[in-house]
Amino acid sequence: MINPPLDDVEWVSEELALNLKREGFVTLLDLALAPPDILKRCGLGRADAIRLSEKAGEDFGHTKRGANVMGGGRHRGRISTGSLSLDQLLGGGVSTGRVTEFYGESGVGKTQLCFQLCVNAQTLSDNSGDIIFIDTVGTFRPERIAEIAAGRLDENELFKHIFLVKARTSTEQIKVLHSMNGFTSGGVKMLIIDTLTDNFVYEFQGDKYISDRQAALARHLHELAVTAVDRDIVVVVTNTVRARLRKEGGSYIAETGGNTVSQGVHVRIRLERVFGGWAAGRYGGESSIRFKIGKNGIMDWEV
């Protein structure tokens, strides 16, 4: 079993499993994504909470690697971003069976990438199926998608396979995962959420609700991961960044949702504006690539 229930994890006590269930965490991946503050509410000290979360992450990683040995990861489909350099950074494009996150400040191309993928999923990928686009902040622009697709795909055919959901609450956003079969008879090939965290940040305002927000986000990300793996589809999410104050003074830029989000996605790509274009880099990587965004969408730096 790739993601066993906590009752079946021998190193999790019955009492702890019961307490975690009361907080909404029922599987090994739930435990791996659980914020330390939630685990502390279950009677653990901070050091024990961190150690338990890391142990769950390691064990979950081992079970996934075991599945991959049997061939689960060798035949993933991929959708091109339109830039060869960006595709190479992603290992060949955005992949089925994974949650890929593009994050950064406003104006760095997150939504433009989503539009490009809506087009490329229909013109460059081999598998059939439809696209669900969850718009949480009013960014969806059909005219821009049509502009990118001009000369490549009939407009009626293009939008026949794109299903837009305007999710203005976290509940509406989460419900989409439970009703995907009702959207399309042709099956879903890609799910896009632009932006992942906005509804959660708006609804859980104030320091006293941070733990609740992170727990809700962790559950949502778990469901996204399971959806990507079980349905073997592409899941793409965008995310914002925010300024955080340092205790010793000054500030730094952090991803909205913090470690809960960064640990809940499979691939993280940081986007930035640079002189003459845009840049992308994988989290933890030393180098980045450059690309451009033009009338026809995403393209390589040198064309």
Image (spheres, grey):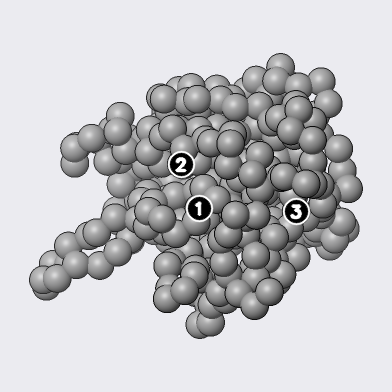
Check if mark 3's residue and mark 2's residue have beta carbons within 8 Å: no
Please say if 200 is above or below 45: above
Q: In front: 241, or 59?
A: 241
Does residue 242 appear anywhere in the picture?
A: yes
Answer with mark 3 or mark 2, whichever residue precedes in sequence: 3
Q: Which residue is mark 3?
A: 79
Residue at mark 2: 195
The numbered mark at residue 110 is: 1
Query: How much space separates mark 2 and mark 1, taking CA atoms?
Result: 9 Å
Question: Which residue type carries mark 3?
Answer: Ile
What kind of element bears circle 1? helix
Q: Residue furthest left?
A: 249
Asked whether 149 or 211 is in front, the reply is 149
Tag 2–tag 1 contact (CB < 8 Å): yes
Q: Quadrant of the C terminus?
A: bottom right
Residue that appears at 87% across and 43% down? 127
Q: Position of residue 11 (x, y in %)?
A: 55, 51
- Label 1 – label 3 distance at C-alpha: 16 Å
- Residue 84 against residue 171 in the figure, above or below: below
Furthest residue toward bottom: 286
